[in-house]
């Protein structure tokens, strides 16, 4: 029984509540059908583009454009499905430990934050969509309003679901109280507007530290906390049109490389449904099943191998977790431990080429991308070894009584069965390296390959699971992409405030030369990575800080590797790092469960980072 069904079972038997349940169920099905169709269409469109370009040498000039248009609809409607299912990421540690009376209020407060933001942004999102009517897409010549309308429609649907949930749950009084609290906070901020203007950039602490912390700790969905803090900052302290928030939200969710996220999520679900995942796990278990923590080592190795293929860390995790997590759980691993290791491996592998972060930092700072690709492999290996030490320590006392080592014959038979699955990562990487498909398109090749292998080897296909897998893919990606969009809007607001310039000026005046500058850079990018998400942090501060690093004698490739790894640690560190919540969403694990297990891994990553920072050869040894 899923979350929605559980909630429906507890609905009071009133006429109004019953009507709300029926309406919510009907509307939910109406949304799930198009998201399943959209996910399937994205796969077909991108695969058709690959086939037409590579086999027939006749590129489809409209394929990327149509995929981009549909992608925003997929992201927003996926966020609606996630909202209905209660799958948007949130931190509920304090809420779960609060007395029942306060817990009820916190739950109402979380709902009120979402309702407040959706109600505030709805008008601006409609204005934004209307403004986009004047823009015409270059290839298909379609007015962009058809694409931009996804945002107001998605917001309106989430608002409707929120209100229906209140009606059927009977929590209207508590939510009204929570809305009054939010209104009181907003009124207080508005009254203090003259003070904020006089405070300069110290006002950022109020909006982006205090407000965000209150919302996150109170259990409100992370995406809505980021978004409402940004909205409040711009509305109260600037004269910026609030359609800019929608524009930044759109930009963050619509980056074409992020289209690989739903495709890799679907590929991971497909690998599991067709039995390829089971075959691979059985083979790996034959090899390492007798080793304490064996599959944890496999997870680290898999993340090292597949990282960079898609250009998106969320997609990398989505390609690995569905394959390994079910068997690891069956063998007794705790969900919190698994998501802690997954998130840590995501931070560990940020510098493995062809990483989108490496490409971005090269493009905005002028550092050679080829040099960054050469310099990123060994530092990631250092961090991987640091994580292996923690895995060894945690599993050193595991009881392996009754576990026998598989014979070479058993391992060989398992290898033959698993070979099609084991070949998949190499096929994907070869397709990217040889130019058969882009990082965005390559997962479609994996999907087609998996379906063909399934039909050839088993002469059947799990058609009954196809639609649920498509809907699950959209829901998961909607939750992830909404967080990224909200973080992008926050990053833009910080840029406009002048905070990045102030930070650069402060770091230039530090005493102690290169050592102090490197230490402060590590601390700064850990913090920035947790607040801004990876690429916005690099785009904001890279052009400002790299000239300072060159001036004081730090090699630009070495500095780039260090700040990327520091940013990755922040990105995957709770309670603010959105990468951590993306890992939780992909692993379908409550964020609370991973809070405690992740800290030893993060400490190991930090020690590994300090080793990389102290020994420049690790980053520069393979440069020509």
Image: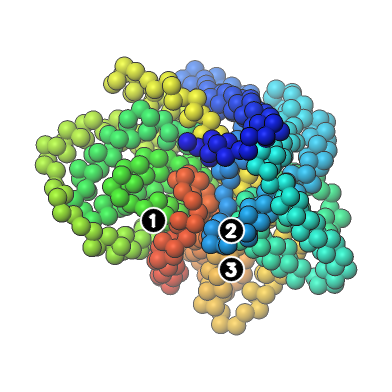
Look at 27% across and 60% down and name the residue there.
Answer: 395
Q: Nearer the viewer, mark 3 or mark 1?
A: 1
Q: Is residue 132 above or below residue 142?
A: below
Residue 328 in the image, given as x and y percentages of width and height: 32, 47
The residue carrying mark 1 is: 337
Indicate which disc, 3 or 1, sits on the residue closer to the N terminus.
1
Q: Residues within 10 Å of mark 1 (few under 14, many from 20)?
A: some
| Among the 4 quarters of the image, the one containing residue 319 | top left
Q: Nearer the viewer, mark 2 or mark 3?
A: 2
Q: Are marks 2 and 3 in contact (CB under 8 Å)?
A: no
Q: Residues within 10 Å of mark 2 (few under 14, many from 20)?
A: few
**In what element is the residue under mark 3?**
helix
Left or right relative to 86: residue 264: left
Q: Are marks 2 and 1 in contact (CB under 8 Å)?
A: no
The C terminus - image quarter: bottom left
Q: Could you give the CA–CA distance between mark 3 and mark 1, rounded to whole angstroms?
A: 27 Å
Look at 29% across and 20% down and name the residue there.
Answer: 458
Q: Could you give the CA–CA distance between mark 2 and mark 3, rounded to whole angstroms?
A: 39 Å
The residue carrying mark 2 is: 100
Left or right relative to 133: residue 549: left
**In what element is the residue under mark 2?**
helix
Look at 49% across and 28% down and name the residue there.
Answer: 468
The residue carrying mark 3 is: 524
Q: Nearer the viewer, residue 612 or 341?
A: 341
Indicate which disc, 2 or 3, sits on the residue closer to the N terminus.
2
Q: Nearer the viewer, residue 425 or 56?
A: 425
Q: Nearer the viewer, residue 499 or 211?
A: 211
Left or right relative to 317: residue 407: left
| Among the 4 quarters of the image, the one containing residue 457 | top left
Q: Is residue 308 above or below residue 580?
A: above
Q: Could you give the CA–CA distance between mark 2 and mark 1, rounded to whole angstroms?
A: 28 Å
């Amino acid at each position: 029984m899923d979350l929605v069904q559980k909630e429906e079972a507890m609905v009071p038997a009133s006429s109004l509540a019953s009507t709300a349940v029926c309406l919510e169920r009907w509307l939910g099905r109406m949304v799930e059908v198009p998201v399943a169709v959209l996910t399937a269409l994205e796969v077909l469109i991108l695969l058709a583009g690959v086939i037409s370009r590579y086999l027939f040498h006749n590129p489809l000039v409209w394929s990327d454009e149509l995929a981009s248009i549909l992608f925003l609809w997929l992201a927003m409607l996926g966020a609606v499905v996630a909202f209905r299912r209660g799958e948007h990421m949130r931190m509920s540690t304090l809420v779960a430990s609060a007395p029942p009376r306060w817990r009820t209020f916190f739950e109402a407060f979380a709902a009120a934050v979402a309702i407040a933001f959706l109600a505030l942004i709805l008008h601006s999102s409609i204005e934004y969509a209307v403004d986009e009517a004047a823009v015409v897409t270059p290839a298909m010549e379609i007015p962009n309003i058809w694409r931009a309308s996804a945002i107001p429609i998605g917001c309106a649907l989430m608002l409707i679901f929120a209100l229906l949930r209140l009606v059927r749950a009977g929590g209207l009084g508590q939510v009204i109280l929570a809305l009054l609290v939010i209104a009181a906070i907003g009124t207080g901020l508005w009254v203090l507007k003259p003070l904020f203007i006089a405070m300069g950039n110290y006002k950022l602490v109020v909006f982006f530290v205090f407000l965000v912390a209150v919302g996150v700790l109170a259990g409100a969905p992370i995406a809505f906390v980021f978004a409402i803090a940004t909205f409040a900052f711009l509305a109260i302290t600037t004269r910026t049109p609030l359609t800019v928030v929608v524009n930044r939200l759109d930009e963050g969710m619509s980056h074409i490389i992020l289209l690989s996220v739903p495709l890799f999520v679907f590929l991971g679900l497909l690998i599991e449904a067709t039995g390829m995942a089971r075959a691979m796990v059985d083979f790996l278990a034959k090899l390492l099943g007798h080793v304490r923590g064996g599959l944890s080592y496999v997870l680290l190795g898999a993340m090292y191998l597949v990282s960079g293929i898609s250009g998106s860390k969320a997609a990398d995790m989505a390609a690995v977790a569905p394959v390994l997590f079910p068997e690891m759980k069956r063998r007794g691993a705790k969900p919190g431990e698994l998501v802690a290791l997954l998130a840590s491996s995501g931070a560990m592998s940020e510098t493995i080429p062809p990483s989108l972060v490496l490409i971005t930092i090269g493009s905005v700072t002028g550092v050679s991308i080829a040099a960054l690709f050469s310099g990123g492999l060994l530092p990631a290996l250092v961090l991987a070894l640091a994580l292996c030490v923690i895995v060894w320590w945690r599993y050193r006392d595991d009881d392996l009584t009754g576990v026998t080592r598989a014979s070479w014959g058993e391992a060989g038979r398992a290898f033959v069965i698993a070979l099609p699955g084991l070949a998949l990562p190499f096929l994907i990487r070869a397709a990217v390296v040889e130019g058969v498909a882009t990082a965005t398109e390559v997962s479609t090749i994996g999907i087609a390959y998996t379906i063909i292998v399934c039909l050839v080897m088993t002469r059947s296909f799990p058609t009954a699971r196809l639609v649920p897998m498509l809907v699950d893919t959209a829901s998961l990606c909607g939750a992830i992409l909404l967080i990224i969009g909200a973080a992008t809007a926050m990053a833009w607001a910080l840029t406009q405030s002048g905070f990045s310039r102030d930070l650069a000026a402060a770091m230039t005046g530090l005493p102690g030369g290169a050592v102090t500058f490197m230490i402060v850079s590590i601390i700064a990018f850990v913090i920035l990575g947790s607040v801004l998400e990876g690429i916005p942090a690099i785009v904001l501060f890279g052009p400002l800080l790299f000239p300072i690093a060159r001036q004081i004698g730090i090699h630009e490739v070495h500095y780039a590797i260090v700040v990327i790894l520091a940013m990755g640690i922040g990105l995957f560190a709770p309670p603010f790092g959105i990468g951590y919540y993306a890992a939780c969403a992909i692993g379908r694990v409550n964020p609370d469960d991973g809070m405690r297990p992740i800290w030893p891994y993060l400490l190991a990553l930090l020690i590994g980072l300090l080793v990389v920072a102290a020994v420049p050869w690790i980053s520069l040894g393979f440069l020509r």
